[in-house]
Image (cartoon, rainbow, N blue to C red):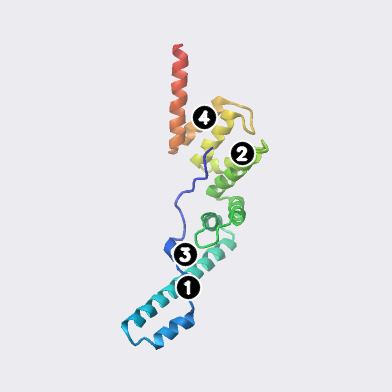
């Protein structure tokens, strides 16, 4: 099945190098080098230590900004935080916290989060055959013209997952997704048309 696909719309243009900076620098060490910078090697060590400290401060301030905006309750900021937790950028990777913020963002109407949350539920439903909850979130995202959500709804109708199997409806969703630029939907429609053409000639 298709995995989570997120578009590159991060609100905060965060250089991932910031977050890979060493986190164990000590400000007292920096000042110690500064006081004793009597030769070039000490001076270089001082510059390097201050650079690490600068990156650590930037990392901390960025985390504060991202968290603060997410807690203010706007969907796009909550989605950004969910992605950072999901990918382990700037924060320790945590599926639980990523899911928490995807859900909050989805409830606040942000379509990317609605799609991602629907897909998370869809993947979980493979073991329970309970796809209706996933369909609910896909439909919310589809109403906002999310091509990936439209494609997945088509897949669900095609296989009868959480809905009665209806190939005609599935094709309709694939066509809508393709019109919005879904390459998966375009390819699947091509394959389906090939199958139909072959059956017509038999």
Nearer the observer, 131 or 77: 131
Question: Which circle, 1 or 4, is nearer the viewer?
Answer: 1
Counting residues from the start of the chain, the first of labels 2 and 4 encountered is 2
Q: Position of residue 201 (x, y in %)?
A: 44, 12
Q: Residue placed farthest to the left in the image?
A: 40
Q: Secondary structure at mark 2?
A: helix
For discs 1 and 3, the disc positioned in front in the rendered view:
3
Contact flag, marks 1 and 2 (Cβ < 8 Å):
no
Residue at the spot of label 1: 57
Residue at image point 44% right, 61% down:
16
Q: Can residue 24 be seen at all in this image of the molecule?
A: yes
Say which element carries label 3. Answer: helix
Q: Are marks 3 and 4 in contact (CB under 8 Å)?
A: no
In the rendered image, residue 114, in percent from the top left (x then y), is placed at 57, 47
Q: Residue at x 58, y 40 (%)?
A: 139
**Residue at horizontal 58%, vertical 50%?**
109
Q: Which mark is residue 19?
A: 3
Mark nearest the camera among 2 and 3 is 3
Q: CA distance from mark 2 to mark 4?
A: 16 Å
Mark earlier in primary sequence (1, 3): 3
* Residue in the foreground of this view, choosing between 161 and 23: 23
Estimate the spatial distance between the alpha carbons at disc 3 and disc 4, rounded to whole Å: 44 Å
Residue 41, percent from left and from top: 34, 80
Label placed on residue 172: 4
Mark number for residue 135? Answer: 2
Q: Nearer the viewer, residue 15 or 31?
A: 31
Identify the residue at image location x=60%, y=57%: 97
Between the C-alphas of marks 1 and 3, the distance is 11 Å
């Amino acid at each position: 099945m298709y995995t989570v696909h997120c578009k590159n719309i991060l609100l905060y243009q965060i250089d991932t190098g910031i977050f890979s900076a060493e986190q164990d620098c000590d400000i007292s060490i920096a000042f110690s080098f500064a006081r004793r910078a009597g030769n070039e090697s000490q001076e270089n060590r001082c510059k390097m230590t201050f650079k690490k400290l600068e990156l650590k401060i930037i990392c901390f301030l960025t985390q504060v900004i991202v968290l603060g905006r997410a807690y203010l309750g706007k969907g796009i900021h909550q989605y950004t935080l969910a992605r950072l937790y999901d990918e382990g950028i700037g924060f320790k990777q945590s599926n639980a916290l990523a899911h928490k913020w995807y859900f909050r963002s989805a409830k606040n109407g942000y379509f990317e989060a609605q799609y991602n949350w629907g897909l998370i539920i869809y993947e979980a439903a493979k073991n329970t055959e309970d796809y209706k909850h996933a369909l609910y979130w896909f439909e919310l995202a589809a109403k906002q013209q999310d091509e990936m959500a439209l494609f997945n709804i088509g897949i669900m109708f095609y296989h009868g997952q959480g809905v009665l199997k209806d190939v005609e409806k599935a094709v309709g969703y694939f066509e809508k997704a393709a019109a919005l630029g879904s390459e998966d939907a375009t390819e699947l429609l091509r394959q389906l048309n090939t199958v139909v053409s072959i059956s017509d000639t038999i």
